[in-house]
Amino acid sequence: MEGIPVFRPGGPSLVHLLIAAAGSGRRMGAATNKLLLPLAGRPVLAWTLDAALACGAIRWIGVMGRPEDEAAIAAILAAAEPRRSLAEPVAWIVGGDTRQDSVRRGLEALPADAEAVLIHDGARCLAEPELLERCASALSQAMAEGAGIIAATPVTDTIKQVDGQGLITATPERSGLWAAQTPQGFGVAQLRQAHGRAEREGWSVTDDAALYERLGLPVRVLEAPPSNIKLTTRFDLTIASAVLAARGT
Ligand SMILES: Nc1ccn([C@@H]2O[C@H](COP(=O)(O)OP(=O)(O)OP(=O)(O)O)[C@@H](O)[C@H]2O)c(=O)n1
Ligand SMILES: C[C@](O)(CO)[C@H](O)COP(=O)(O)O
């Protein structure tokens, strides 16, 4: 897009992080926000925060949440804070009715000096600090070419395109298919403009990279482990418990 500053090469390697935590957990079938559910004895969101607070490349963290979850999330933040002191406390941001709107609100709440931002699902609580570090580093490089980055993992199942009658209409070539995850990283100015365009044009997307793609902006994938799952259903909680047990946490 014209007029958007491209991140200066060798610019700050520290990034801002927005954690999307304002969902309702419908597919989890829980009475509360799934990020407040217990996992290995702690709330799901606490595990996500552990990785964020352990990542030295992150200079500021904001959490988008639902108003009714503010007190519960504040308690999780308070318990997490002593693990590492950031220059500022983790910021509370009221999320929106969709993930897309929560991210837009998060972008509006960023500090004025924010240039590079990682967007991470609170539901991807198995992401390790190393992945966040790699995403932050890759973002600093990608922004020099005006690109975004996303964590992703190559697809291992054969994927089918299926019509409304349950009939297969296509089998995309698997070698070119990746499952998008988060973190996803972007230039703040560019992503703000992309969200503004999406709001004006009524675009509805399930990840932020799709906005860059619609605008013809490049996005690079960064290979992430298949363990970086998004906790969506009860079964995912079982998987996450097993992964944490295998890690000895
Ligand atoms: N309005 C929303 C919806 C989702 N999210 C966050 O975006 C991530 C991915 O969303 P998803 O897994 O779909 O969470 P839910 O919307 O809670 O799940 P469901 O669709 O089953 O209700 C989650 O960390 C969720 O908290 C958000 O910040 N704001
Ligand atoms: C952003 C994301 O995690 C990438 O895979 C995914 O699109 C979120 O989807 P959801 O339906 O909001 O969980």
Image (cartoon, helix red, strand yellow):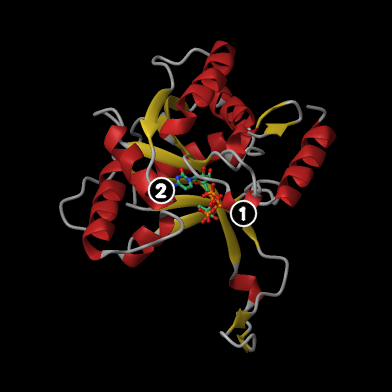
Under circle 1, the secondary element is: helix
Taking depth in this image into account, of 192 and 200 the one nearest to the observer is 200
- Vertically, is 159 above or below 4? below
Q: Residue drawn at (61%, 41%), measured in percent from left and top?
A: 31
**Image position of 223 (left or right of 197):** right
Q: Mark 2 — residue?
A: 142
**Image position of 236 (left or right of 72):** right
Under circle 2, the secondary element is: helix
- Vertically, is 81 above or below 221? above
**Tag of residue 27:** 1
Pointer 2 local density, CA inside 10 Å: few below 14, some 14–19, many at least 20: many
Q: Which amino acid does label 2 sit on?
A: Ala
Q: Disc 2 versus disc 1: distance between alpha carbons?
A: 34 Å
**Image position of 84 (left or right of 13):** right
Q: Residue drawn at (63%, 83%), measured in percent from left and top?
A: 171
**Tag of residue 103:** none
Q: Does the residue labelled 1 lie within 8 Å of ligand 1?
A: yes
Q: Residue drawn at (40%, 14%), measured in percent from left and top?
A: 87
Residue 168: x and y in percent read: 64, 87
Rendered-image quadrant of the N terminus: bottom left
Taking depth in this image into account, of 109 and 183 the one nearest to the observer is 109
Taking depth in this image into account, of 121 and 141 the one nearest to the observer is 121
Q: Do the residues labelled 2 and 1 touch (CB within 8 Å)?
A: no
Q: Which amino acid does label 1 sit on?
A: Arg
